[in-house]
């Protein structure tokens, strides 16, 4: 479903009026258009299911030498910078760093594709925990391994700018599948590799 920019413009204008501002003053005249254009960009991932994202980034390599000689070794991409929007308050989930690991089975994926998957999944109204789960599902589908792990560290505007107002409080979430879930040695290695 395409993002309806005209409808966003109409509603943003209404929000500006509802908070007591004048949507026709010079600084706000183009704000509804700017917000609609921004929403089209930052919520791009809403247009795709996890299966469709897996199809988009399904470019893998059959690296027999690597897979046969390094069984149980992991591929890790750490500290992928991205952001998302909390579905509860529509506030930013920011300073987000996503680390992703998998143990290759029959194929490997290009490293930039891992980053692109993290970005696309984040471009939705989200929960931090679901971001990890979505990434794990997509990566598992592409590379055909159950052995996937995701660690996300982030700050949430709904905790830092409103409500409890605790700037600097970070939320850490983990998603472990396969060997990462059932064998602590894999999870421990992943934590060790990704600690700051």
Image: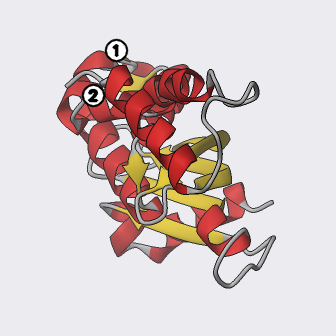
Quarter holding residue 153: bottom right
From the viewer's perspective, is residue 53 above or below residue 141? above
Give the image location of residue 191, x and y in percent.
63, 65
Residue at the image point whose x is 44% and y is 21% from the top: 65
Q: How crowded is mark 1: few (under 14 residues within 10 Å), some or many (20 or more)?
A: some
Q: Find the residue positioned furthest to the bottom.
A: 164
Give the image location of residue 112, x and y in percent.
55, 21
- Residue denoted by label 1: 59
Quadrant where the image shows the C terminus: bottom right
Q: Nearer the viewer, residue 167 or 96?
A: 167
From the viewer's perspective, is the residue at label 1 or at label 2 nearer?
A: 2
Give the image location of residue 108, x and y in percent.
40, 26
Residue at the image point whose x is 48% and y is 20% from the top: 110
- Residue denoted by label 2: 47
Residue at the image point whose x is 40% and y is 19% from the top: 63
- Tell me, yes or no, if residue 106 can be seen here: no
């Amino acid at each position: 479903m395409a993002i309806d920019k005209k409808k966003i413009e109409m509603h943003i204008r209404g929000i500006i009026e509802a908070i007591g501002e004048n949507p026709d003053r010079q600084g706000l005249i183009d704000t509804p258009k700017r917000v609609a254009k921004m929403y089209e960009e930052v919520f791009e991932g809403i247009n795709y299911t996890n299966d469709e994202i897996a199809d988009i980034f399904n470019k893998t390599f059959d690296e027999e030498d690597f897979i046969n000689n390094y069984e149980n070794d992991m591929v890790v991409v750490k500290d992928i910078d991205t952001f998302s929007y909390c579905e509860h308050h529509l506030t930013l989930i920011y300073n987000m760093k996503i680390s992703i690991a998998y143990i290759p089975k029959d194929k490997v994926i290009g490293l930039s594709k891992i980053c692109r998957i993290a970005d696309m999944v984040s471009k939705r109204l989200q929960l931090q925990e679901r971001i990890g789960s979505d990434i794990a599902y997509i990566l598992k589908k592409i590379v055909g391994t159950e052995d996937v792990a995701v660690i996300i560290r982030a700050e949430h505007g709904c905790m830092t700018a409103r409500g409890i107002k605790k700037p600097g409080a970070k939320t850490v979430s983990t998603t472990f599948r396969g060997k990462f879930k059932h064998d602590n040695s894999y999870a421990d290695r992943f934590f060790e590799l990704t600690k700051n």
